[in-house]
Image (cartoon, rainbow, N blue to C red):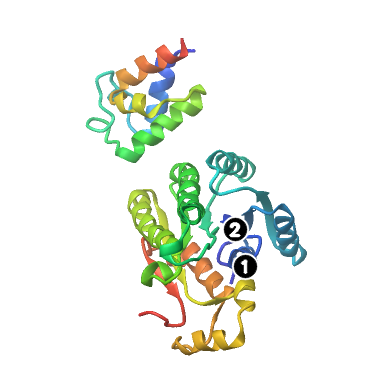
Protein backbone atom coordinates (compact mmCIF):
# COMPACT_ATOMS: atom_id res chain seq x y z
CA UNK A 1 0.00 0.00 0.00
CA UNK A 2 1.29 3.44 -0.90
CA UNK A 3 0.72 5.77 2.01
CA UNK A 4 2.00 9.09 0.64
CA UNK A 5 0.69 9.23 -2.92
CA UNK A 6 1.37 12.62 -4.59
CA UNK A 7 2.73 14.24 -1.44
CA UNK A 8 5.70 16.60 -1.49
CA UNK A 9 8.20 15.88 1.26
CA UNK A 10 11.33 17.82 2.16
CA UNK A 11 14.00 15.82 3.97
CA UNK A 12 17.06 17.65 5.28
CA UNK A 13 20.44 15.95 5.54
CA UNK A 14 19.11 13.32 3.18
CA UNK A 15 22.04 12.64 0.88
CA UNK A 16 23.16 9.69 2.98
CA UNK A 17 22.60 7.69 6.15
CA UNK A 18 19.27 7.73 7.95
CA UNK A 19 18.11 10.78 5.98
CA UNK A 20 18.62 9.00 2.68
CA UNK A 21 16.72 5.95 3.90
CA UNK A 22 13.85 8.21 4.90
CA UNK A 23 13.85 9.86 1.45
CA UNK A 24 14.00 6.46 -0.25
CA UNK A 25 11.10 5.11 1.80
CA UNK A 26 8.99 8.23 1.37
CA UNK A 27 9.44 8.10 -2.41
CA UNK A 28 8.62 4.40 -2.38
CA UNK A 29 5.27 5.37 -0.86
CA UNK A 30 4.43 7.65 -3.79
CA UNK A 31 5.69 11.03 -2.62
CA UNK A 32 8.26 13.30 -4.25
CA UNK A 33 11.26 13.54 -1.95
CA UNK A 34 13.08 16.84 -1.92
CA UNK A 35 16.57 16.03 -0.72
CA UNK A 36 18.45 18.87 0.94
CA UNK A 37 22.08 18.41 1.93
CA UNK A 38 25.38 20.25 2.00
CA UNK A 39 27.29 18.10 -0.44
CA UNK A 40 26.18 18.65 -4.05
CA UNK A 41 27.73 15.47 -5.38
CA UNK A 42 26.09 13.37 -2.68
CA UNK A 43 22.74 15.07 -3.32
CA UNK A 44 22.98 14.26 -7.05
CA UNK A 45 23.87 10.63 -6.34
CA UNK A 46 21.00 10.26 -3.87
CA UNK A 47 18.48 11.75 -6.30
CA UNK A 48 19.81 9.51 -9.07
CA UNK A 49 19.47 6.39 -6.91
CA UNK A 50 15.81 7.10 -6.19
CA UNK A 51 15.21 8.05 -9.80
CA UNK A 52 16.83 4.83 -11.04
CA UNK A 53 14.20 2.66 -9.36
CA UNK A 54 11.42 4.76 -10.87
CA UNK A 55 10.49 6.86 -7.84
CA UNK A 56 10.46 10.64 -7.60
CA UNK A 57 13.13 12.84 -6.02
CA UNK A 58 14.73 16.21 -6.58
CA UNK A 59 17.66 17.77 -4.77
CA UNK A 60 18.98 21.06 -3.47
CA UNK A 61 22.36 21.91 -2.00
CA UNK A 62 21.91 24.04 1.10
CA UNK A 63 22.91 24.61 4.68
CA UNK A 64 20.00 24.36 7.14
CA UNK A 65 21.53 27.08 9.30
CA UNK A 66 21.24 29.59 6.44
CA UNK A 67 17.71 30.91 6.80
CA UNK A 68 17.76 32.98 3.62
CA UNK A 69 18.91 30.04 1.55
CA UNK A 70 16.28 27.77 3.10
CA UNK A 71 13.51 30.35 2.60
CA UNK A 72 14.34 30.74 -1.08
CA UNK A 73 14.55 26.97 -1.69
CA UNK A 74 11.21 26.37 0.04
CA UNK A 75 9.71 29.15 -2.06
CA UNK A 76 11.00 27.49 -5.20
CA UNK A 77 9.63 24.09 -4.13
CA UNK A 78 6.26 25.65 -3.38
CA UNK A 79 6.25 27.41 -6.73
CA UNK A 80 6.99 24.17 -8.55
CA UNK A 81 4.54 21.89 -6.72
CA UNK A 82 1.99 24.34 -5.32
CA UNK A 83 2.33 22.83 -1.85
CA UNK A 84 4.69 21.35 0.73
CA UNK A 85 3.04 18.49 2.62
CA UNK A 86 5.81 17.04 4.73
CA UNK A 87 9.03 18.27 6.33
CA UNK A 88 11.47 15.84 7.92
CA UNK A 89 14.11 17.70 9.93
CA UNK A 90 16.90 15.17 9.88
CA UNK A 91 20.10 17.17 9.29
CA UNK A 92 22.41 16.71 12.23
CA UNK A 93 26.05 16.47 13.23
CA UNK A 94 28.10 15.32 16.20
CA UNK A 95 31.23 16.83 17.68
CA UNK A 96 31.80 14.67 20.71
CA UNK A 97 34.02 15.43 23.65
CA UNK A 98 33.96 15.48 27.41
CA UNK A 99 32.22 18.53 28.76
CA UNK A 100 35.31 19.65 30.68
CA UNK A 101 37.24 19.90 27.46
CA UNK A 102 34.50 20.75 25.00
CA UNK A 103 35.33 23.69 22.77
CA UNK A 104 32.69 26.39 22.61
CA UNK A 105 32.91 26.19 18.84
CA UNK A 106 31.96 22.50 18.99
CA UNK A 107 29.04 23.29 21.27
CA UNK A 108 27.85 26.06 18.94
CA UNK A 109 28.25 24.03 15.77
CA UNK A 110 26.13 21.13 17.03
CA UNK A 111 23.41 23.35 18.53
CA UNK A 112 23.36 25.41 15.33
CA UNK A 113 22.92 22.60 12.85
CA UNK A 114 20.76 20.27 14.92
CA UNK A 115 18.54 22.64 16.88
CA UNK A 116 18.62 25.97 15.08
CA UNK A 117 18.48 24.24 11.70
CA UNK A 118 15.31 22.46 12.80
CA UNK A 119 13.85 25.75 13.99
CA UNK A 120 14.71 27.54 10.73
CA UNK A 121 13.25 24.86 8.47
CA UNK A 122 10.12 24.62 10.63
CA UNK A 123 9.65 28.38 10.57
CA UNK A 124 10.18 28.66 6.83
CA UNK A 125 7.86 25.78 5.96
CA UNK A 126 5.13 26.88 8.37
CA UNK A 127 3.81 29.69 6.19
CA UNK A 128 2.98 27.22 3.42
CA UNK A 129 1.50 24.65 5.77
CA UNK A 130 -0.52 27.25 7.69
CA UNK A 131 -1.98 28.56 4.48
CA UNK A 132 -2.78 25.06 3.33
CA UNK A 133 -4.38 24.21 6.68
CA UNK A 134 -2.47 20.97 6.61
CA UNK A 135 1.05 19.69 7.07
CA UNK A 136 3.26 17.19 8.79
CA UNK A 137 6.59 17.80 10.44
CA UNK A 138 8.78 15.01 11.77
CA UNK A 139 11.87 15.98 13.74
CA UNK A 140 14.65 13.46 14.12
CA UNK A 141 15.75 13.57 17.76
CA UNK A 142 17.68 10.80 19.50
CA UNK A 143 17.47 8.63 22.60
CA UNK A 144 20.52 10.62 23.68
CA UNK A 145 18.20 13.62 23.96
CA UNK A 146 16.13 11.63 26.46
CA UNK A 147 18.81 9.93 28.52
CA UNK A 148 21.97 11.99 27.99
CA UNK A 149 25.36 10.55 27.17
CA UNK A 150 28.85 11.12 28.51
CA UNK A 151 30.91 12.84 25.84
CA UNK A 152 27.87 14.16 23.99
CA UNK A 153 26.63 17.10 26.07
CA UNK A 154 26.22 19.28 22.98
CA UNK A 155 24.46 16.58 20.96
CA UNK A 156 22.23 15.59 23.91
CA UNK A 157 21.26 19.21 24.53
CA UNK A 158 20.45 19.74 20.85
CA UNK A 159 18.30 16.61 20.69
CA UNK A 160 16.56 17.38 23.99
CA UNK A 161 15.93 20.84 22.56
CA UNK A 162 14.41 19.30 19.45
CA UNK A 163 11.97 17.35 21.62
CA UNK A 164 10.86 20.55 23.40
CA UNK A 165 10.67 22.39 20.07
CA UNK A 166 8.50 19.56 18.74
CA UNK A 167 6.02 19.97 21.59
CA UNK A 168 5.87 23.75 21.26
CA UNK A 169 5.38 23.71 17.51
CA UNK A 170 2.78 20.95 17.84
CA UNK A 171 0.83 23.22 20.18
CA UNK A 172 1.21 26.32 18.02
CA UNK A 173 0.19 24.64 14.79
CA UNK A 174 -2.44 22.15 15.97
CA UNK A 175 -5.36 24.47 15.22
CA UNK A 176 -4.24 24.53 11.58
CA UNK A 177 -4.15 20.77 11.22
CA UNK A 178 -0.36 20.61 11.25
CA UNK A 179 1.06 17.70 13.20
CA UNK A 180 4.57 17.76 14.63
CA UNK A 181 6.23 14.70 16.11
CA UNK A 182 9.74 13.60 16.98
CA UNK A 183 11.43 10.31 16.29
CA UNK A 184 14.15 9.23 18.69
CA UNK A 185 16.41 6.61 17.14
CA UNK A 186 18.58 4.47 19.40
CA UNK A 187 21.71 2.69 18.23
CA UNK A 188 21.35 2.60 14.45
CA UNK A 189 23.69 0.95 11.99
CA UNK A 190 25.11 3.58 9.63
CA UNK A 191 28.36 4.29 7.79
CA UNK A 192 29.55 5.78 11.05
CA UNK A 193 28.90 2.74 13.21
CA UNK A 194 30.23 0.39 10.50
CA UNK A 195 33.68 1.63 11.41
CA UNK A 196 33.36 0.51 15.04
CA UNK A 197 35.09 -2.68 16.18
CA UNK A 198 32.79 -5.71 16.38
CA UNK A 199 33.41 -5.99 20.12
CA UNK A 200 31.95 -2.55 20.77
CA UNK A 201 28.96 -3.29 18.57
CA UNK A 202 28.40 -6.55 20.47
CA UNK A 203 28.57 -4.71 23.79
CA UNK A 204 26.05 -2.13 22.67
CA UNK A 205 23.76 -4.76 21.24
CA UNK A 206 23.82 -6.70 24.51
CA UNK A 207 22.27 -3.69 26.26
CA UNK A 208 19.36 -3.61 23.80
CA UNK A 209 16.35 -5.80 24.70
CA UNK A 210 15.80 -6.72 21.05
CA UNK A 211 19.54 -7.54 21.00
CA UNK A 212 20.45 -5.96 17.71
CA UNK A 213 21.31 -2.57 16.32
CA UNK A 214 18.54 -0.77 14.48
CA UNK A 215 18.63 -0.10 10.76
CA UNK A 216 18.01 3.17 8.96
CA UNK A 217 14.93 1.48 7.49
CA UNK A 218 13.53 0.95 10.99
CA UNK A 219 13.65 4.72 11.44
CA UNK A 220 12.35 5.46 7.93
CA UNK A 221 9.32 3.18 8.43
CA UNK A 222 8.23 5.19 11.46
CA UNK A 223 8.68 8.45 9.56
CA UNK A 224 6.43 7.18 6.77
CA UNK A 225 3.79 6.18 9.31
CA UNK A 226 3.94 9.55 11.11
CA UNK A 227 3.73 11.37 7.78
CA UNK A 228 0.69 9.37 6.71
CA UNK A 229 -3.00 9.92 7.47
CA UNK A 230 -2.92 6.83 9.64
CA UNK A 231 -1.10 8.91 12.26
CA UNK A 232 -3.76 11.63 12.00
CA UNK A 233 -4.44 11.74 15.75
CA UNK A 234 -0.80 11.81 16.87
CA UNK A 235 0.97 15.10 17.55
CA UNK A 236 3.58 16.47 19.94
CA UNK A 237 4.97 13.00 20.64
CA UNK A 238 8.48 11.62 20.76
CA UNK A 239 8.53 8.03 19.59
CA UNK A 240 11.61 5.89 20.15
CA UNK A 241 12.98 3.45 17.59
CA UNK A 242 15.52 1.83 19.85
CA UNK A 243 14.79 -1.86 20.27
CA UNK A 244 13.63 -1.16 23.81
CA UNK A 245 16.92 0.44 24.90
CA UNK A 246 15.13 2.84 27.21
CA UNK A 247 11.63 2.43 28.54
CA UNK B 1 -5.12 50.93 -6.80
CA UNK B 2 -7.76 51.33 -4.12
CA UNK B 3 -5.80 50.12 -1.11
CA UNK B 4 -8.75 50.27 1.25
CA UNK B 5 -10.93 48.04 -0.91
CA UNK B 6 -8.07 45.61 -1.49
CA UNK B 7 -7.30 45.36 2.24
CA UNK B 8 -10.94 44.72 3.06
CA UNK B 9 -11.05 42.02 0.37
CA UNK B 10 -7.99 40.34 1.85
CA UNK B 11 -9.43 40.44 5.36
CA UNK B 12 -12.71 38.93 4.19
CA UNK B 13 -10.83 36.20 2.37
CA UNK B 14 -8.33 35.46 5.11
CA UNK B 15 -10.64 35.55 8.11
CA UNK B 16 -13.78 34.26 6.43
CA UNK B 17 -15.92 37.17 7.65
CA UNK B 18 -18.69 39.20 5.95
CA UNK B 19 -17.78 42.49 4.25
CA UNK B 20 -20.27 44.29 6.51
CA UNK B 21 -18.32 43.26 9.61
CA UNK B 22 -15.08 44.78 8.33
CA UNK B 23 -15.53 48.31 9.66
CA UNK B 24 -12.60 50.63 10.28
CA UNK B 25 -12.96 50.26 14.04
CA UNK B 26 -13.18 46.47 13.96
CA UNK B 27 -10.42 44.75 15.92
CA UNK B 28 -9.06 41.65 14.20
CA UNK B 29 -9.01 39.62 17.38
CA UNK B 30 -11.94 41.01 19.37
CA UNK B 31 -14.44 41.70 16.61
CA UNK B 32 -13.42 39.54 13.66
CA UNK B 33 -12.61 36.36 15.57
CA UNK B 34 -8.97 36.14 14.52
CA UNK B 35 -6.54 34.21 16.68
CA UNK B 36 -2.83 35.03 16.98
CA UNK B 37 -1.89 32.80 14.03
CA UNK B 38 -4.55 34.48 11.87
CA UNK B 39 -3.04 37.89 12.55
CA UNK B 40 0.43 36.65 11.55
CA UNK B 41 -1.00 35.14 8.39
CA UNK B 42 -2.88 38.34 7.60
CA UNK B 43 0.30 40.38 7.86
CA UNK B 44 2.07 37.88 5.57
CA UNK B 45 -0.81 38.22 3.15
CA UNK B 46 -0.45 42.03 3.12
CA UNK B 47 3.29 41.66 2.54
CA UNK B 48 2.69 39.33 -0.35
CA UNK B 49 -0.14 41.24 -2.02
CA UNK B 50 1.47 44.67 -1.72
CA UNK B 51 5.03 43.43 -2.12
CA UNK B 52 6.36 45.15 1.00
CA UNK B 53 8.05 44.12 4.24
CA UNK B 54 6.19 44.87 7.43
CA UNK B 55 8.51 45.03 10.44
CA UNK B 56 7.41 43.04 13.50
CA UNK B 57 7.27 46.23 15.57
CA UNK B 58 4.90 47.77 13.05
CA UNK B 59 2.83 44.62 12.72
CA UNK B 60 2.11 44.63 16.46
CA UNK B 61 0.34 47.96 16.14
CA UNK B 62 -1.98 46.89 13.34
CA UNK B 63 -4.77 45.69 15.58
CA UNK B 64 -7.76 47.12 13.74
CA UNK B 65 -8.89 47.31 10.14
CA UNK B 66 -8.48 51.10 10.14
CA UNK B 67 -4.94 50.97 11.50
CA UNK B 68 -3.96 48.42 8.88
CA UNK B 69 -5.40 50.47 6.04
CA UNK B 70 -3.78 53.67 7.28
CA UNK B 71 -0.41 51.95 7.67
CA UNK B 72 -0.51 50.36 4.24
CA UNK B 73 -1.60 53.58 2.56
CA UNK B 74 1.36 55.35 4.15
CA UNK B 75 3.80 52.61 3.16
CA UNK B 76 2.60 52.49 -0.42
CA UNK B 77 2.48 56.23 -0.93
Mark 1 vs 2: CB contact within 8 A: yes
Q: Residue at x 47, y 60 (%)?
A: A138
* Mark 2, residue position: A13
x%, y% of residue A57?
A: 68, 57
Q: Label 2 marks which chain's residue?
A: A
User: 10 Å neighbourhood of mark 2: few (<14), some, or many (≥20)?
Assistant: many
Question: In the image, which disc is placed on residue A152?
Answer: none
Q: Nearer the viewer, residue A73 or B27?
A: A73
- Residue A7 in percent (x, y) is at 58, 56
Q: Secondary structure at mark 2?
A: loop
Q: Which residue is mark 1?
A: A17
Instruction: Name the one closer to the observer, A160 or B32.
Output: A160
Near mark 1 (Cα within 10 A), the count class, few <14, some 14-19 or many ≥20, is: some
Q: Are marks 1 and 2 on the same chain?
A: yes
The answer to which of A53 and A66 lies nearer the viewer is A66
Name which quarter of the figure residue B15 lies in: top left
SS at badge 1: helix
Amino acid sequence: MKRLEDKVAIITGAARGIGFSIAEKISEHGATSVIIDLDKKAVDTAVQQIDDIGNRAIGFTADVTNSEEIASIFKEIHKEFGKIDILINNAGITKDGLLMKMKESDWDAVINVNLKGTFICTQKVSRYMLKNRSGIIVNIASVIGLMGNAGQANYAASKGGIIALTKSSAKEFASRNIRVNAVAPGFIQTEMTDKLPQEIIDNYSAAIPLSRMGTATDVANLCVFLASDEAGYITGQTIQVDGGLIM
Amino acid sequence: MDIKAKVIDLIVEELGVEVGEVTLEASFIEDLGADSLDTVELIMKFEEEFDIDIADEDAEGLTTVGKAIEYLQKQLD
